[in-house]
Amino acid sequence: MSKSIFTTTSRSSSFTINSVAKRPKHHHHHHHQTPQKQEQEQEELPETSEDQSLLPGLPDHIAQLCLSKVQPSLLYSVCWPWRRLIYSPSFPPFLSIYALLIPSETTPDHQSHDSIKFSCFDPISSNWLSLPSPPPDPLLCLLLRHPSFISRRLPIQSVTVSGKLVLLAATADQFQPALNSPLIFNPLSKTWTYGPPIAAPRRWCAAGASAGVVYMASGVGSHYNLDVARSVEKWDLLMNQNNSSINIKRDSQTANWRWEKMGGLRDGRFSRDAIDAVGWKGKLCMVNVKGDAAKEGIIYDMKNDAWEEMPEGMLAGWRGPAAAMDEEIIYMVNESKGVLRMYDPLKDAWVQILESKMLQDAQYVAAAGGRVCIVGGSGLEIVVVDVVVSPPRFWVVDTPPAYQAVAIHVLPRMGH
């Protein structure tokens, strides 16, 4: 197998993947290195002193401006000062893959509560890094399986908003909602914080985010309740985000950092599954069940706090997990056919981008920085598709040994 480096820039963030690639022969190939050779080159980086300038003859602040225009993957292999620079707060953070991992089903502890792992794939060093543990009070206890649903994994719902990872809903023992408040991870500060208490904690809900606002709709608590199943709430994560009271102590939240009730659903049909509400052009798009089955679809207009029917073409072609790139383009994987498609609103149709057996049984999708990241049915591989180039290219990032992904997101790299 070979190593390949691909970099693209989307707005102010770059997304570089340096990973073990598994490509069919017809894919485009670029510079190749064996893992052993790359590791040897990294070990042979020139030794430098701590006070060595970044670029001889230039002040460091000017040198940083120059080097920030260069692909981080290239800087990483040159010298230690440049390697330290790309992980410093002053360097534009590159995008990385974040995953919620559980032991693979072949391991004996795959149902254990404490076996859940939060990790980040650093595309520059090509390493998986563990996130700091969530706060111990209260203990995060998530139920993954139950004897009554032996063939089904219980969902853990999370969203990406304003460069942060937010856990919103999951199931605890006795089928209770596992989270009374959102749990937030800030990659740059490497810290976990709590969000405002949820008036009606729930699971199996519709969860999404747009423009710095988190939305939670429908779902069930410990028991089905029609009011909860029809309810919609939002939480503006950006409000008072610079206030020092927003920290790990939940009792110190400001009065303005809270969930607000919005216009409710007509019925509780969206409480049957864990739904991704995809933020797109100022709206949230959602379907009521996962997979390739027939669905009901609905769109929430956030500006007008109103619900509208999903266009026929969008609903008819929605046959798998979906995500939006910069809230402008929706990408969806038809999981039965293994086809990545994008939605064309002018034609009200899904346009094919790529077909591969590796995309069959796709479970989760994330999109950012010109890349669409897809977790296959086994959860052991993440397929990364470059949708900027034509024809599109894809490669594979393996999950850590003995672990499978149950959720993925694309966020700025962790601070050091």
Image: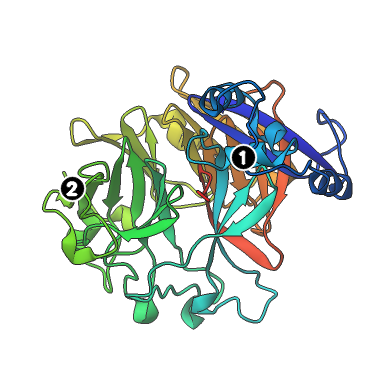
Label 2–label 1 contact, CB within 8 A: no
Marks 2/1: CA distance?
A: 60 Å
Any part of residue 337 in sight: no
Seen from the viewer's position, the closer of residues 33 and 182 is 33
Q: Which residue reaches farthest left?
A: 255
Give the amino acid type for the residue marked by disc 1 in the picture: Asp
Any part of residue 398 in sight: yes
Q: Position of residue 383 (x, y in %)?
A: 67, 44
Give the amino acid type for the residue marked by disc 2 in the picture: Gly
Residue visible at 11% across and 53% down in the picture:
255
Task: Please state if 259 lies on the left or on the right of 75 as rendered.
Answer: left
Seen from the viewer's position, the closer of residues 197 and 355 is 197
The residue to which callout 1 is attached is: 51
Displayed quadrant of residue 30:
top right
Residue visible at 17% across and 66% down in the picture:
251
Q: Earlier in the sequence, mark 2 or mark 1?
A: 1
Q: Position of residue 388 (x, y in %)?
A: 62, 24
Residue visible at 18% across and 47% down in the picture:
264
Seen from the viewer's position, the closer of residues 350 and 15 is 15
* Label 2: element kind: loop
Displayed quadrant of residue 337:
top right
